[in-house]
Structure formats: C-alpha cells, structure tokens
Image (tube, grey):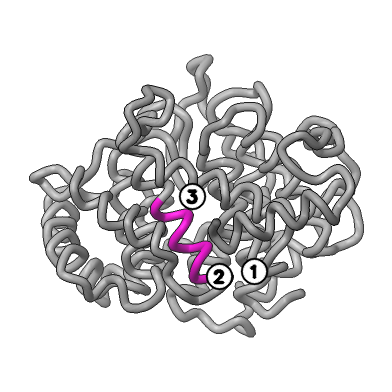
Amino acid sequence: MSRRTTLLFALSVLVPGFGADADAPAKLGPNSDTEAMGEFSTERGARFLGEVSVKWTRERKCGTCHTNYAHMMAGPLVKKESPELLEVRNFFEGRAEGWDKPEKSAKPIAEGEIVATAAALALNDAASTGKLHPITRAALDRMWTIQRPDGGWNWFDCDLPPSEDDDYYGTVLAAIAAGHAPDAYKETDAARRGLDKLRGYLRATPAPHLHHRALLLWASAGVDDLMDKADRERTIADLLAKQRPDGGWRLTSLGKWERRDGTANPEDAPSDGYGTGYVVYVLRQAGVAPDAEPIRRGVAWLKTHQRASGRWFTRSPSLDHAHYLTHAGTGFALMALSACGEK
C-alpha cells in the first residue's frame, strides 16, 4: 500500500464523511460574474478548488485541464496535503498505474491524457514533497514513448481554448513537466532525447498566439534553449503591454479565439482570474521581481476580485455553458499569489 493510499485509508477512518463512499462535496453555486466579491483568502480559494476538483473526479472519473489537473498544480502551494488533494492524487496515480491493464476503461482516453497526467503529477511532486514519485517518473518516461517524430504530441482538440485546442499547448506542457520535475529528471537519457526532438518542433512551429508564447516562457524557466534572450524579452514586454488600467489582465487579450456561436470575444471584456493569475505567475517564473509595479498591481487586482465562494471568475472564451475555466483561473490565481509571497 502506497503512502498516499495509507493516508487515504486513515482519513476514511478518522474523518467523518471522507472517502469514496462519502457524500459529494458541498454544492457550490454556478460560476458566475454576478457572484459577490468576498474577503481575500488563499485558503478559501484552495478549498473551493479542492471541492470542485473532487466533485469532477468522482462524477466524471477523468482528468481535465480546467479543474483537477489545475488543482494538482495549485493546491500544494497553499497547503501541502489535504483530503481533497490526496483523493485526486490517488485517482491520477491509479490512472497512470492502470494504463497497461487489459480493461478498456483503464486505457488512456487519448495520448493527451498521458502528457497531462505526467505533468500534473510532476508539478504536484515539485510543489508538495520536492521528490519525484516512482509513478510520476514512470508516467514521464511513458510520455516520451508517444512523442511524434516531429517532436510534438497529439493533444486534445476539443475546441476549448486556451488549453484543449491545439497540439502546441500539449507539446509545451511536456517541456514544463520535464523541466520542473524534481530530482533533475530532465537530465535523464529519455528526457534529454525527447527534449532535443521537442526543440526541433518548436523551431519549426511558431506559437499561435501570446497565450502559448507565455506558456513557452514558463517552460523556458526549466529547460534551456527553448527561447533566446530576445524572444523572452519580447514576450515579457508583450504580456506587460496587455495589462489593463485596473491592474488585471483578461484571457481573451492573449489570443484570438472565436466563440462556438461564431461571434468574437468582446474587446472590452473585463479583467479576469485566469488572465491575471496566469500572466502574473508566468512573469514571476521568467524572473520579473515580485515588487515590480506591474506585478504589485496584478496582485492587488487578485486580492480585491476574489468571489465570496473563494473562486476567481473567468468567462469561457468559447461558450457560456458552465465557465469551467474559472477553476483553472482560480488555480493560476493561487499559483501567482504564492509566487509573490502572498498567503
């Protein structure tokens, strides 16, 4: 029995209502821009993200960039371990261990699941224990076995920008996973070979928009020779130029995405949690100081725009069904605040 499984068992015994047979997390209202603002609290933000992550994991039994993968990255930065993180982590470990089982339900949903799960586990390891878990190492090693000859990966094409929309995102996420995994994983033979091929993909494939150039900027903080100095400085400048007068950023200023109904995203949309959290976090990874004026203004926006539930709202750039990107936006807000020393 793994350490996490042991802890899950102990929690199921010691904590009333915890575990697979427990009631679902408390029902939260829909993601809405009409929700009232609340007092700033990273703990409340992490609690919201944990609740929606566990709910998604139990009901959907799959991973998604906008909710439980985001929870894996952001959650440990607020609290190293929680019942919610343990449950979601255990789910992803089980998925990774089961990919070679004969049951059809155990197989990866798509090749993108392997990359996304490896990245979530690696970033979770980095933020929690600082040690590379054996299951994480195995998932990362498997990631290279499905890398295409051109150095890229077949990613989710769900028409759900910015994360589940094109192969470029999945390819750069693989670089983030390898570069930020603990125990110098990027120096292993498998990672070295894979990253060399990945660099070839990036030389031949330009980033489709600023959001993905920012993703590459993040990756370049952990892997050498992904961007040259001029590209890094240009990307930082372009991100800073998108900051709004209120100190925040809006996601749809980072890319031109058409909505499912064929309409354009409005140019006058307000700042949002994803745009602000993502840009502040990436700029910090790129070495912009936490006391730099744009960062201080971005942090001030985050601290004054958290909703009463703990979330930071973000309107979906594709459809107005559920605004699940609010969950990823909450994750990036928490990551940004942590990177700036805010508790």
Q: Which residue is mark 1?
A: 77
* Of the pair 229 and 125, the residue shown nearer to us: 125
List x then y, in percent, for residue 317.
55, 33
Q: Earlier in the sequence, mark 3 or mark 2?
A: 3
- Relative to 188, 204 lies left or right: left
Q: Amino acid at mark 1?
A: Leu
Q: Amino acid at mark 2?
A: Ala
Which residue in the structure is indicated by mark 2? 127
Q: Nearer the viewer, mark 3 or mark 2?
A: 3
Disc 3 element: helix
Residue 22 percent location from the top left of the image: 80, 37
| Residue 62 in picture, x, y percent from top left | 52, 33
> What residue do we see at 27% from left, 50% from top?
143
Task: Name the spot of residue 313 as percent of width and height, x first.
Answer: 72, 43
The three-letter amino acid code for the residue at tag 3 is Glu
Q: Is residue 303 above or below residue 208?
A: below
Camera-side residue of 78 and 90: 90
Residue wearing tag 3: 93
Q: Earlier in the sequence, mark 3 or mark 1?
A: 1
Residue 135 placement: quadrant: bottom left
> Residue at the location (50% across, 79% down)?
288
Asked if disc 3 and disc 1 are in contact, CB closer than 8 Å, the reply is: no
Vertical position of residue 173 compared to residue 53: above or below: below
Q: Quarter holding the N terminus?
A: bottom right
- The boundaries of the magenta stretch are 118-127
Mark carried by residue 327: none
